[in-house]
Amino acid sequence: MGQIKKQNIFFCQMIVFLAAFLFFNNISFAAPILKLNSHGHDVIVLQQNLMRLKYSVSKVSGNYDKETQDAVKAFQKDNRLSVTGIVNRETWWAIKGGRPTISTSSTSSQTAKPTNSPIWDNISSVPYGRTFLDKKEVSSIISTAKNYMGVPYVFGGASPEEGFDCSGFLEYIFARNGIEIPRTADEQYKLGKLVRQSQLVAGDLVFFTTYEPGASHCGIYLGNDKFIHASSSRGIRVDDLNDSYWASRYYGGKHIVK
């Protein structure tokens, strides 16, 4: 009986260890593996990247077709990667590294600001890890965000004139309200305090794992499980956290409202 008890304890310990390993290493499992006949949001972002890098993709369809595969192979060849036509983590990071410098690297807390844009005058930056948005400012943040409903998604975009990507949209909205936040989703994820979904309040930030490991998509929480964001397929829109697509990719909510 003692031997059986020891085996049961060991088995339980192994389960706990495995669960912890998977939890703390979930980033490594989130890297996109895209290949012929894949489809969805990740493929949309891939195609937008390839188009920006001047590879031959005639349209952003969300379907990994032969044309997309050929473009990936061309990119892999140009960058001395294994020419497989399959987007693994190495290929994705190479594509990300080769994109235009309209977005800053994740090591920078801000991007170059347009010198002729009044929204960057008298703007204050915010601290990492702390709440910073006053409750009385929330309605203005949300109202400003909703003013841009329907503006198209553009990878690297950070203005209504050129279009928005997800983190560029958040940066712009907060800047319109005199608050400077980082440019990229992974840096924006460092803001505020991590809370459960049930603890989110309007004005907080929500993050998702989509086209790359970690926090790679973001939006502003509106309350009642709704959030506004720059959707790669439909531009600025409101979606539900409980939607099967977003629920399966939910990465965390950051409480920024003090």
Image (cartoon, rainbow, N blue to C red):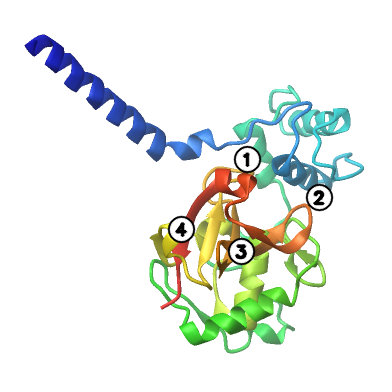
User: At which x and y percent is residue 163?
Assistant: 79, 65
Q: Residue at x 80, y 67 (%)?
A: 151
Q: First in sequence: mark 3 or mark 4?
A: 4
Q: Amino acid at mark 4?
A: Gln
Query: Callout 4: helix, strand or loop?
Result: helix
Q: Along the horizontal axis of the image, is 1 left or right of 120?
A: left
CA gap between label 1 and label 4 equals: 30 Å
- Using the image, tell me which numbered label, if any, was put on residue 52: 2
Q: Earlier in the sequence, mark 2 or mark 1?
A: 2
Residue 107 visible within the image: no
Does residue 32 sit above or below 207 in this rendering? Answer: above
Asked if the residues shown at circle 1 and circle 4 are in contact, with their CB atoms under 8 angstroms apart, the answer is no
Q: Earlier in the sequence, mark 1 or mark 4?
A: 1
| Distance between mark 3 and mark 4 Cα atoms | 12 Å
Q: Quadrant of the N terminus?
A: top left
- Horizontal arrangement in the rendering, residue 75 relative to residue 167 (left or right): right
Quadrant of the snapshot with the C terminus: bottom left
Q: Earlier in the sequence, mark 3 or mark 1?
A: 1
Label 1: which secondary element: helix
Are the residues at dot 2 and dot 3 in contact (C-beta closer than 8 Å)? Answer: no
Residue corresponding to mark 3: 227
Residue hosting label 1: 93
Query: From the viewer's perspective, is the residue at label 1 or at label 4 nearer?
Result: 4
Please give the residue where the numbered disc 4 appears in the rendered image: 197
Give the secondary structure at mark 3: strand
